[in-house]
Amino acid sequence: MSNSSSISHFLLLALAETRQLQLLHFCLLLGISLAALLGNGLIISAVACGHHLHTPMFFFLLNLALSDLGSICTTVPKAMHNSLWDTSTISYKGCAAQVFLLIFFMGADFYLLTIMCYDRYVSICKPLHYGTLLSSRACAHMAAAAWASGFLNALMLTANSFSLPLCHGNALGQFFCEIPQILKLSCSKSHLRELGLLVATASLSLCCFVFIVFSYVQIFRAVLRIPSEQGRHKAFSTCLPHLVVVSLFLSTVIFAHLKPPSISSPSLDLALSVLYSVVPPALNPLIYSLRNQELKAAVRRLMTGWFQKH
């Protein structure tokens, strides 16, 4: 029997058993992380440098790119280190930091996606009130609220999780630290307090999900009433990337944590955790760039200017 005070480190789940597969996973994670860094970095630079992109939609997209960068930098570097050096340990403080940062960035990510849905709703359903409802001050307040909500949520969940006594070893069934794995090691009934916080967080997330669904119902009804086919196509083009990103984020997270135990297996759990923690930050810039001509033009100008200087 051991408790949390005697645990100095945790054992993370290895991505592969053989040395060749470990190196292969290292290369794959390196490629994904570089793609995420490049894609999100280009979006941040293009929006920051392009004055014509200083609109609410691109302001929230810049914030989303920042949260995606933070999310992938929380889990991938440690996983790459463990795969390269054939180890599986993470320090107690490092695990706590990873839990906090992952909840912070993923929470902010979801709240920002909800705000971006509101931006699309106002743009299409209430265009005459767009300048008032989404003024610079209002956008700054909404973005700050998203980051603050993610921070407070992460702080409460992390503090409660790591205050629980742990007596079921130190092996985590995941390649990064997350709260469900920490709770499995707890031997205290006080983890009901943690479950209560998780339920509160899930309820807030459900409210955001219901808001997104309601908004898109209104958006699609408004778009279908647009008389011209070109107008409908333009409206759908601005909404489709956001809808794809939200669907990718929610479907992977929900299935990973709410799938039936009968279909659960270590390999499936590992694949799903990669899908919701690693893949979205790398794919989001591509999804948003494919359908947005303004963003693509700004990125091209940015890269052309960089190559001319060098």
Image (spheres, rainbow, N blue to C red):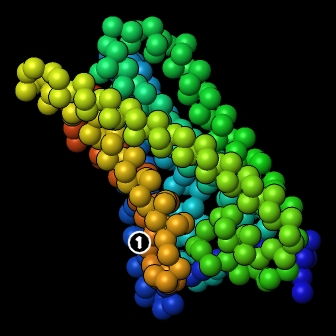
The residue that mark 1 highlights is 27
Outermost residue, bottom direction?
A: 18
Residue 128 location, x and y as percent? Answer: 33, 8
Residue in the picture at 89% in, 82% down: 2
Residue in the picture at 49% in, 60% down: 254
Determine whether, in the image, residue 246 is placed left or right of residue 230: right
Q: Split into 4 quadrants, where in the image is the N terminus?
A: bottom right
Looking at the picture, does residue 230 appear above or below residue 64?
A: above
When asked about the image quadrant of residue 213, the answer is: top left
Determine whether, in the image, residue 1 is placed left or right of residue 10: right
Work out whether residue 271 or residue 91 is closer to the camera in this orientation and state it.
271
Residue 141 location, x and y as percent? Answer: 59, 21
Mark 1 residue crowding within 10 angstroms, few (<14) / some (14–19) / many (20+): some
Looking at the picture, does residue 93 appear above or below residue 249?
A: below
Work out whether residue 7 or residue 220 is closer to the camera in this orientation and state it.
220
Q: How many marks?
A: 1
Residue 192 location, x and y as percent? Answer: 80, 63
Residue in the picture at 69% in, 55% down: 198
Residue 186 location, x and y as percent? Answer: 81, 74
Q: Split into 4 quadrants, where in the image is the C terminus?
A: top left
The answer to whether residue 233 is seen in the rendering is yes
Determine whether, in the image, residue 1 is placed left or right of residue 42: right
Determine whether, in the image, residue 106 is placed left or right of residue 162: left
- Helix, strand or loop for disc 1: helix
Residue in the picture at 54% in, 16% down: 138
Looking at the picture, does residue 22 appear above or below residue 120?
A: below
Looking at the picture, does residue 261 appear above or below residue 249?
A: below
Q: Amino acid at mark 1?
A: Cys
